[in-house]
Amino acid sequence: MQEFYIRQYSVNPVLEMELIADGRYDFMKSLMNDAIQDSEVTFSMKDEETGLLKVAKEKANIVLANDGGCDEKYILQYKWKERDVAKKGVFNGWFEIKFNGDLINGDGTVYPEGNLIVPVEEELRIFVK
């Protein structure tokens, strides 16, 4: 589980998560370069104690990571608003990508337009202190 710490009412640091690059999601790698240009990324966060959403599908970004490697890697980013972190506590967070249009893999497999709860390295727990 990945842990992220932020102070109450702070807007920094920006939350960043890397997409999984394991064999289970290889289809994403081949689709991502074309599809990412026309997608919408959102971030949501739920209070662990109450189960209520604190952040609901707020606009997030996806950027190409410049790590000098051969494979392209993508980072999901969310820029905090003060209201997001107004309450101290522990929260679960996740990103979602909505692809606008059908995705067609190199082997001809069609993935209809829709939402993908993005796989990340680990589950995300956010601590507002």
Image: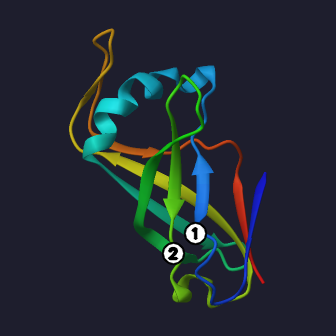
Q: Residues within 10 Å of mark 2 (few under 14, many from 20)?
A: some
Mark 1 secondary-structure assignment = strand
**Label at residue 55:** 2
Image quadrant for the C terminus? bottom right
Image height check: is 128 above or below 76? below
The location of residue 18, given as percent across then percent down, is: 60, 45
Image height check: is 26 above or below 116? above
Q: Tell me which residue sits at (26%, 38%) in the image.
A: 113
Q: Tell me which residue sits at (44%, 51%) in the image.
A: 62
The location of residue 71, given as percent across then percent down, is: 53, 25
The type of residue carrying mark 1 is Met
Q: Tell me which residue sits at (54%, 22%) in the image.
A: 70
Residues at badges 1 and 2 in contact (C-beta under 8 Å)?
yes
Q: Quadrant location of residue 59?
A: bottom left
For the residues marked 1 and 2, what is the alpha-carbon distance in whole angstroms? Answer: 5 Å
Q: Quadrant location of residue 126?
A: bottom right
The type of residue carrying mark 2 is Val
Image height check: is 3 above or below 86? above
Whichever of labels 1 and 2 marks the residue nearer the N terminus, that label is 1
Mark 2 secondary-structure assignment = strand
Q: Nearer the viewer, residue 78 or 109?
A: 78
Question: From this viewpoint, which residue is outermost toward the left?
Answer: 101
Q: Left or right? Give the position of 124 relative to 69.
A: right
Q: Left or right? Give the position of 26 relative to 97.
A: right
Which residue in the structure is indicated by mark 1?
Answer: 45
